[in-house]
């Protein structure tokens, strides 16, 4: 994952993309209606990654923007649009407040619906 670098008068701070993904994954998983984080479509990072946040969140950093793709499964009965909007807000606020840098977009990918029986 791409790191985000910030220069200050005191020096440079580099925030790993894995850290940003972890923040985003935690924020998304705490939204009511989210059953679990889902695996994103396979790429080399997703295949070799050992942490769920790396498998469920893609971070794309450029000099001017940070874009996050978050992959989740929702609980059966969750209102999809409302829950997706809450995920976007929660992830954006969490990442921005913890890193101090703006998030341009949070794309939410609903990969499935999970009933309580499926969790057993």
Image (tube, grey):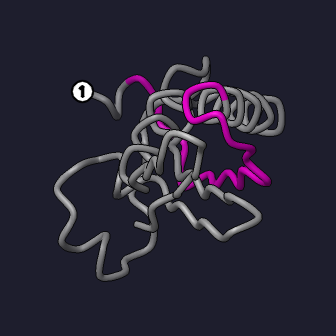
Pick out the residue farthest to the bottom.
44
| Residue 45 in the image, given as x and y percentages of width and height | 30, 73
Instruction: Residue under label 1, please give it.
Output: 120
Residue at (65% x, 34% y) in the render = 100
Residue 62, quarter of the rendered image = bottom right
Residue 115 counted in the magenta span: yes
Task: Compare residues 77 and 2 and report the one nearer the observer.
Answer: 2
Residue at (51% x, 43% y) in the render = 73
Q: Give the tally of numbered discs.
A: 1
Pick out the residue farthest to the front.
9
Above or below, 63 against 103 in this view is below
Bin the neighbour count of mark 1 within 10 Å (Cα to Cα): few under 14, some 14-19, many 20 and up: few
Task: Compare residues 14 and 81 and report the one nearer the observer.
Answer: 14
Residue 26 in the figure: left or right of residue 108: left
Residue at (52% x, 57% y) in the render = 5
Question: Can you say which quadrant of the picture contains the N terminus?
Answer: bottom left
Residue 37 in the figure: left or right of residue 95: left
Task: Compare residues 16 and 24 and report the one nearer the observer.
Answer: 16
Q: Secondary structure at mark 1?
A: loop
Residue 103 in the figure: left or right of residue 17: right
Task: Compare residues 49 and 109 and report the one nearer the observer.
Answer: 49
| Residue 28 in the image, given as x and y percentages of width and height | 55, 32
Q: Which residues are magenta?
A: 97-116
| Residue 111 in the image, given as x and y percentages of width and height | 54, 55
């Amino acid at each position: 994952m791409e790191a985000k670098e910030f220069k200050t008068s005191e020096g440079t701070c580099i925030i790993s993309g894995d850290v940003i993904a972890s923040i985003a994954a935690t924020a998304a998983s705490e939204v009511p209606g989210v059953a679990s984080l889902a695996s994103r479509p396979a790429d080399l990072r997703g295949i070799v990654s050992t942490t769920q946040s790396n498998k469920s969140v893609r971070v794309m950093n450029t000099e001017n923007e940070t874009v996050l793709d978050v992959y989740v499964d929702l609980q059966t009965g969750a209102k999809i649009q409302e829950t997706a909007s809450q995920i976007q807000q929660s992830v954006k606020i969490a990442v921005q407040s913890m890193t101090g840098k703006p998030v341009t977009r949070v794309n939410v990918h609903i990969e499935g619906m999970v009933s309580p029986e499926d969790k057993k």
